[in-house]
Image (cartoon, grey):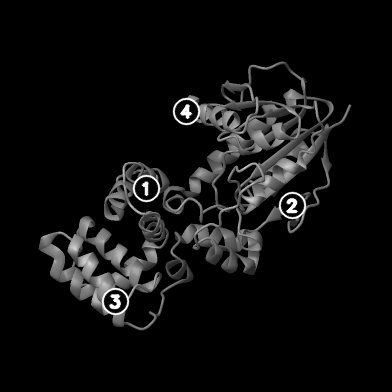
Amino acid sequence: MALEALARVDAGAYANLAVRSLLDGSTMSPVDRHFVTTLVNGTTRLRRALDWRIDAHAKGPIDPETRRVLRMGAYQLTELRVPAHAAVYETVRVAPRRSQGLVNAVLRRVAEAPEPAWPSEAVRLSYPDWIVDRLYADLGSVAAETLDAMNAAPAVHTRDDGYVQSPSSQAVAALVEVRPGDRVLDLCAAPGGKATALAALGAEVVALDAHIGRARLILDNARRLGLNVPTVVADGRRPPLALGSFDHVLVDAPCSGLGALHRRPDARWRIQPADVDDLVVLQRQLLAAAVTMVRAGGTLTYSVCTLSRAESTGIDEWMAVAHPRLASMPVSVRPWSAHGRGAMVLPQWQGGDGMCVFRYRLIH
């Protein structure tokens, strides 16, 4: 089952959806279901490092199907510390018949080999070069710990109402500082974690998302929690809502996700450097629309689950010039640290997503 999920990921599927679709029809025990999930997510995250180990012991080219099997076996040996006899035997069993001898030989060499002399930090940590370079440039020496933290499986954090949500996202919702009866627009709301958190505090929340399937997630989550969250399917750059009609607007914008790569195992291989530039354009457009929705004296909160300067302090610098009527508001929340005029949390600080947040008040 894990091998089938990895094949689907290689064909373009998202890892979490590939695993879920296979497990939904399964009668596996909870232990085995957890093992499948761990095996698929871990193999996907660490595929560059695994390939380096494999290629050190293989002669000649390896076809994609055999490489998937080898990655899965190498992950069990080097990361899960499954005993070699079990990991090799079970992995060879699911390998194509034509390459079972190769898989057996390579995995036995991987099991016996000392820690390799890695050619670079990017290979050792299993990231594309550009992500390592960008985070070191934007975060400095703390980037090493950040990258390492995002190679671990994410911790599960559950709110008091049973909704599973990163503590970083919970903090962003709290920073909106709503009071009962406040009108709030969540401009990029799916799957509804922040919108439901705000509604639970007594705010009148309108959620908006551009995709009908994602909008249904908001409604389903709100219904499950016993909350009323009217949801609009529309482009957040052109919200079909009355101007200046909200006390608070939250823009948890689409971003490169460079602070949440532990939660999205395939994302590091999907995102490209040019995507960051495109996302900055989209973030500016969403914020320009959000400003028109805020009443005089109201607040605008901008958050992203990325750690790139371009999508955080770079956006804030643009806001200062493009929207001078927005006064920056202080952001104080532990264990977050100051990040320009806003705040940032790193994934290693509390086991949640790395995020940046900025707050503004629309002055009269």
Q: Is residue 134 above or below residue 181?
A: below
Query: Whole-Å distance between the Cαs marked 4 and 1?
Result: 19 Å
Q: CA distance from mark 1 to mark 3?
A: 25 Å
Which label sits in the foreground, 4 or 2?
4
User: In this view of the protein, which residue sits in the foreground, 272 or 222?
Assistant: 222
Instruction: Tell me the kind of residue under disc 1.
Output: Val
Which one is nearer the viewer's eye here, 2 or 7? 2
> What residue is disc 3 on?
84
| Residue 282 as seen in the image, left or right of residue 99 | right
The residue shown at (39%, 48%) is: 15
Q: Is residue 195 visible?
A: yes
Q: CA distance from mark 3 to mark 4?
A: 44 Å
Q: Residues within 10 Å of mark 1 (few under 14, many from 20)?
A: many
Mark in front: 2 vs 3: 3
Q: Quadrant of the C terminus?
A: top right
Q: Position of residue 31 (x, y in %)?
A: 39, 59
Q: Depth-wise, is mark 3 or mark 4 nearer the camera?
A: 3
**Helix, strand or loop at mark 1:** helix
Would you name the residue on which mark 2 appears?
343
* Tag 1–tag 2 contact (CB < 8 Å): no
Say if mark 3 contacts mark 4, CB within 8 Å: no
> Is residue 75 placed above or below 21 in the rendered structure?
below
Q: Which residue is mark 1?
A: 19
Question: Which amino acid, by three-letter code, is at mark 3?
Answer: Ala
**Labels 4 and 2: the sequence-earlier one:** 4
Q: Which residue is mark 4?
A: 213
Name the one closer to the observer, 358 or 182. 182
Q: Amino acid at mark 4?
A: Gly
